[in-house]
Amino acid sequence: MSLFDAILSLFNPEVDAEFDTLWKNYFKGLASWCQEARIDLSRNLSYREKKRIYEHKEAIRSRHNTIVTEEKFNAQVMCNKLRSRYYADYLLSYGRSADDKEYVLSYLRGLDSYISRRIEEEYNRLKEKYPRGIDGYENSCNPKPSKEAVIALGEAKLSELEQRGIEVERGEQWIQKQNEYAQFCRDLREKIFPKWGCYYYDIPTQIPTFNGSSQTVNYRFWQIFYNSYCNVPDLDYSVYPVLQKNYGSLPNLRYLEAHFPKSAYDPIIQIILAIKEQYGDCVVIFGNSYDPNEQSYDEQEMNNFHFKYLKEQLEQNAVECVPLPIMVNVPDCEGYAVPMSKHVIVVELISNNKEMKRWGETIISSLNCNQSHICYISLMKGFDKEEAEKLILERKQKIEKEKQEKEQREKDLQYLKNCVANWERPRYSSIKCFSMYYYYPTTCDWEADGDVWEIRNLIWNFKANPPKSRPMDEIISLHQEAVERIVPQMSACLHLIFGDKVPELTLACIPASTQETTQRRYEDFSNELCKLTGMTNSYPYIRVKEDGDPKHTGGKKKPKYDINREFFKGKFVLLFDDVITRGESMGLFGTILKGFGAEVIGGFSIGITKHELQSSFDPIVELFSNPNHEENN
């Protein structure tokens, strides 16, 4: 610095002071201004240069702030893809100019909220317009793309994806609807002709995927059939001879020398009408019973002969059928295609799997493939080797299982009979019975002690007969006390007598004269005893449908029972009554259940009527006093 500059600086200190301030705090503005003013900051400046800077200090400060704002704006806004895209709209929405960068920097949080709102609104708009396209795109990406990434695809791409999504959805719905239709037809078979056979078949077919390729899925349909045949050589038909027998009858059907009864066609009509009622549209296609080994028969004549009645009934019910010239050979037909959304029922006289699957593939691939739904009905179904082998194996396994079950049942029956071999038969019953206690009625001509009265009261309380002097709630309470005592005792007796075979038994309580008394006496008792022992409870399957007169009142009217015949078929029954006197009730009820197919093992009671005082202990005491009881069984 020259002497003159030094003197000027001495008398104008504010110039140096301002320069130092600008250098320290506003250097970016200073450097930019000096570059423009052609002042080299890399050397010592003269007083005159500093004075020029001093004179433009406000401009330098302003320029510095502008540069800093620009840099901050670039870093915080322009380098952010979303902020750079939306900041101008944000400013305009608040009435600011599009280049008000300081405002943006002051309200970055507000800008971000605005961006989030705009993205949400735009995403929702696009999602409403292209729902399948966006769902498909999001599901195909891992991880799931952001909403802004979806928006960035643009409407042209989203429109393309939407169309692809529609195709994917159509394919998926087609398979879903076919599955529903197949299940509906399967359920109809259960309702309308449960004795007919049914098999399902999966035909591989292609449906589009969202990535533009295709995937193989199974198109399932049910084949329902009236009868069946098979002529695969080297199979053991001994357990299924009807398969070969039916095969021998096929020429008679083809050459019109035999026909099915009307009863075979009526269920087909029912199922077709049920499909029409459910879905509103259906079309019946008649098969040609094609067999490469039998080509001399007239297909059209055969169909006219066998399907005449069926076609007449369908026409009367306005069911669409394929015209006969068309039905001869579907793959070669012209002019007929299964209409969109039609539910197809293929009816064939004689079918084999190869031709049946060809039919299915033809309808799927050639006749509006992704809309029609198929059900297949055969009057005579041909089994292929795999099906026949499986069928024969299952029949053999079933026969073997039934044989083993029969042998085991005979063993169980013999074991149970051995368990009651030492039981006594009451005077008027063919059924052997066991009673836990001796019951001495009040008509005995000797004085009863406390033990006798205890058993009398136990049995009377269990009977829970309609009240005379006691209120009903007391009767019920005393009955419950009796049940709580009898159930554990009876359970212990049964396990000692029958061992681990107790759960094989079915408990059948002999009803009282009225349903009301029967319910009060036996419902809770049966539930508790069977729960404790594992026996099957037959209480819900026996009821008094017409009340009779109580025996203890001397009434003569007999009750009438409603007994579930099917329930008792094959059961090992243990009868139960509160008291056995002469055994008539046991004998009568046992005869009824035997007539229903039950094996009546024996009878059990709380007490057995005795008029003479017995010298021995009660039977329950004798039972538990015999250490060899289990060995004897």
Image (spheres, rainbow, N blue to C red):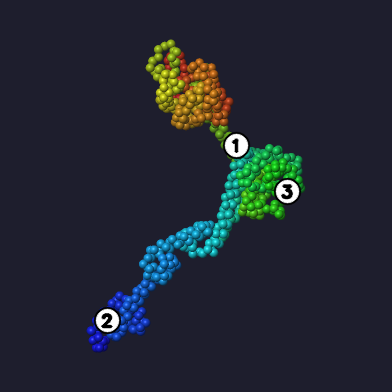
Provide the secondary structure element on which disc 2 rests: helix
* Residue that label 2 marks: 15
Nearer-N-terminus badge (1/3): 3
> Residue beneath label 1, please?
399
Residue receiving disc 3: 324
> How many other residues sit within 10 Å of disc 1, few (<14), some (14-19) or many (≥20)?
few
Query: 314 or 531: which is nearer to us?
Result: 314
Q: CA distance from mark 2 to mark 1?
A: 119 Å
* Foreground residue among 18 and 286: 18
Q: Whole-Å distance between the Cαs marked 2 and 3?
A: 113 Å
252 vs 121: above or below: above
In the image, residue 19 lies at what x, y percent?
A: 29, 80
Apparent side of residue 565 relative to residue 616 in the rendered image (left or right): right
Above or below, 187 against 72 in this view is above
Q: Check disc 3 and give the amino acid type.
A: Leu
Of circles 1 and 3, the one toward us is 3
